[in-house]
Amino acid sequence: MTPEAKAASVYRGRFAPSPTGPLHFGSLIAATASYLDAHAHNGTWLVRMEDVDSSRNIAGAADHILATLDAFGFEWSGEVLWQSTRSEAYGAELDQLKNAGLAYGCACSRKEIADSNADPALDGGLVYPGTCRAGIPQSRSPRAWRLRVGSEAVVFEDRLQGNVSQQLGRDSGDFVLLRADGLFAYQLAVAVDDFYQGISHVVRGADLLASTPRQIWLQHCLSYPTPSYAHLPVVCNAVGEKLSKQTLAPAIKAGSAAASLVDALRFLGQAAPLELRRARVADVWDWAFENWQFLAIPRCPTIPLA
Ligand code: GLU
């Protein structure tokens, strides 16, 4: 069955951690919600290790994440897909975009873009001003490859965050597919892999909401179907920063798996009884499979941890 056929006929979800540190409470929320949503649809749940950005990978983190998922009782289907093994596939899709005139070489350095009065982009970077869109001067060579974006809005209905619309020309500009350091960009890897794995439903943190229109644009350019998206509220700290490995979120511990799972369920709006924190992990999952209510998940992008 081709990935397209799979996506059309069955629920296939995934959890896609980056091995930049141990699993923390924020990633547990994404893992739990994507797992339970797949379970509620009698679907398949896959794990993909997003180690494409080798400059950020921490030695041992991937194995630690998989061991933690296992200790928390998550059961994924098939083998883990490692993005570090997928360069050939990313390269082939990039070639297709180049041949279609959709991807172009860009000679600009970071400093040149910063010096060009570029507008701030939605994801915190800068909107690429389009300097190399019509070609690069003969004296220069491409450093990176970018995808041409269209002028029309990219619109989708998120299952939790509602209607989302971005005008990529204004909100991100032509974005990078192959970076100046030779690594494939996250946006390309995710779009190619979600298609390759036949993902029909993406359930992940709302910190990725601003990336989704770029991924949808890539799906259009590569003639892939667009999955359904649900962006979960993300945990933030007292000053409103997303809880992440960068803000040194504490790792979750296999020894207190049941308690952490109950906390994650309650964060997701589920009425998991507090006594379950002291139960066996399998009992927490039994409760969750029985009582999971997608509609109880708070429909907001961030929630401070109580
Ligand atoms: N690897 C990303 C992260 O750990 C998640 C990407 C995704 O779910 O699409 O934040």
Image: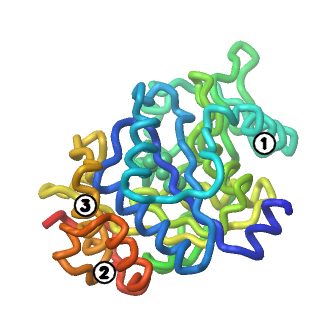
Labels 2, 3: front one: 3
- Assess disc 1: are there few (<14), some (14-19) or many (≥20) residues with their C-alpha within 10 Å of its C-alpha: some
Q: Mark 2 highlights which residue?
A: 270
Q: Residue 36 has which mark?
A: none
The CA span between labels 2 and 3 is 14 Å
Q: Mark 3 highlights which residue?
A: 260
The three-letter amino acid code for the residue at tag 3 is Ser
The three-letter amino acid code for the residue at tag 2 is Gln
Q: What element carries label 2?
A: loop
Residue drawn where x is 56% and y is 65% of the image:
202
Residue drawn where x is 45% and y is 57% of the image:
208
Residue drawn where x is 66% and y is 55% of the image:
194
Residue 156 seen anywhere in this rendered image of the structure = yes
The three-letter amino acid code for the residue at tag 1 is Glu
Q: Residue 93 has which mark?
A: 1
Labels 3, 1: front one: 3
Labels 1, 2: front one: 2
Query: Based on the displayed image, in which of its 4 quarters is residue 236 positioned?
Result: bottom left
In the rendered image, which quarter contains the C terminus? Answer: bottom left
Between discs 2 and 3, the one toward the N terminus:
3
Give coordinates of residue 135: x percent, y percent: 75, 31
Q: How is the image coloured?
A: rainbow
Give coordinates of residue 134: x percent, y percent: 74, 37
Residue 252 seen anywhere in this rendered image of the structure = no
Residue drawn where x is 35% and y is 46% of the image:
23
